[in-house]
Image (spheres, grey):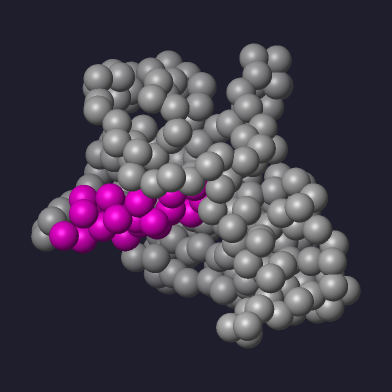
Amino acid sequence: MARRAAFLTKMLSPGGGQYQTKLAVEAVSRSATCLGILTSEGIVLAVERRGTNQVINKYLPTQKIFRLNENMVCGATGFTSDANLLVAELRQIIEAHQQIYEFEICCELMVSILCDIKQNFAQSLDKRPFGVSMIYLCWDLVVGFRLLKSDPRGEYKEEYTATAIGYKFDYANAMLKKELVDKKNVTLTLEDAKILAIKILSKVLATKKMTPEQVEMGTLQRSNDETVFSLLKKNELNRLFRKCNVYDMDYEDDTEDEEMDPDEN
C-alpha cells in the first residue's frame, strides 16, 4: 500500500505530470470495479466487493456505497480510508449549504467543491492526492436523474448514459458503449440495467466464479414524490444471477493487469 501512495515530495515526470498523482490513478485502476447506469426509471449502481467475510458482511452490508442525503448517493473505488474521509467532507458540504442558503445544494456544485479540494491535494507539495474515484447518483428538481464521476486528479464530468471506474474500467466502458450507445433507440428499464451491470461485472472480475456475495448493488428512483435508494438483498441478487445466466457465461481476460491488495480496495 505504501509504495502506491507514499508521502513523498512531489516529483514531475519528463512529460510534466506528477508521479504521485499517476500512482493514485494507477491504484484506483487496480481497485474494485464500480459502474453506474442511468435509465428513465432511475439509476443503478453496482460495485465489486472484495475481501468478503461472513462476519463483516453481517454487520457491514456495504463497503463502497454511501448515502449522502435524501437525493444523493455515491459509489467509491480506491483506498477505503480516503473514501470515508471524502464522504464525510461531502456530507459537511451538503449540510453547510443547507444551513446557509436554506435549500439543497445542486449535485454538480457539490461535486465541484469536492474536486477543488482533491485538486488542491493533488497539486500541493506537502500533501498526497486522494486515491479515490467516485460515481455520484443524484436526483435534481430541475434536471431529474443525474450521473457524475470524479477521479484523484480532481477532474469531474457528467455522464448521460453510463460509466465505469476501477479495475478494467476501459473494458467495462467499452462494453457499456457497445450495449447502450452503438445500439440505437435502446430504452433500458431498471431491471434491464441491473442485469446488464451483473453481466459486465462478470466479464470484468478476475475470478471466473462470481457469486452474489461479490457484488454490491443499489438503485436510486422516485416513488410518491420522494427519492428512494435501496440496496439489493441477497435473494434479489440471486434472482438476477439466475435470470442473466451468469454462471454459464464464457470469460475472456482481455488484459494482463495484476491485482493488488484486494482486501483493501
Splitting the image into 4 quarters, where does residue 10 fall? bottom right
Q: Nearer the viewer, residue 214 or 25?
A: 25
Task: Residue lying at the far front in this picture: please name it.
Answer: 14
Q: Which residue is at a point 72% across and 73% down the rendered structure image? A: 122
> What range is drawn magenta here?
161-182
Residue 198 shows up from this direction: no
Q: Nearer the viewer, residue 5 or 35?
A: 5
Q: Nearer the viewer, residue 223 or 179?
A: 179
Placement of the C terminus among the 4 image quadrants? top right
Q: Nearer the viewer, residue 230 or 57?
A: 57
Residue 173 shows up from this direction: yes
Q: Which residue is at a point 48% across and 54% down the rendered structure image? A: 165
Image: 213 above or below 140: above
Image: 100 above or below 29: below
Splitting the image into 4 quarters, where does residue 203 fall? top left
Asked if residue 177 lies left or right of residue 47, the reply is left
Based on the picture, tell me whether residue 164 belongs to the magenta stretch: yes
Based on the picture, tell me whether residue 171 belongs to the magenta stretch: yes
Q: Which residue is at a point 67% across and 32% down the rendered structure image? A: 263
The number of numbered discs placed on residues in the rendered structure image is 0
Task: Residue lying at the far left in this picture: please name it.
Answer: 184
Percent position of residue 118, x then y? 70, 70
Q: Which residue is at a point 58% across and 83% down the rendered structure image? A: 15
Percent position of residue 132, x then y? 64, 56
Percent position of residue 96, x then y? 77, 68
Percent position of residue 241, x then y? 33, 23
Asked if residue 170 lies left or right of residue 18, the reply is left
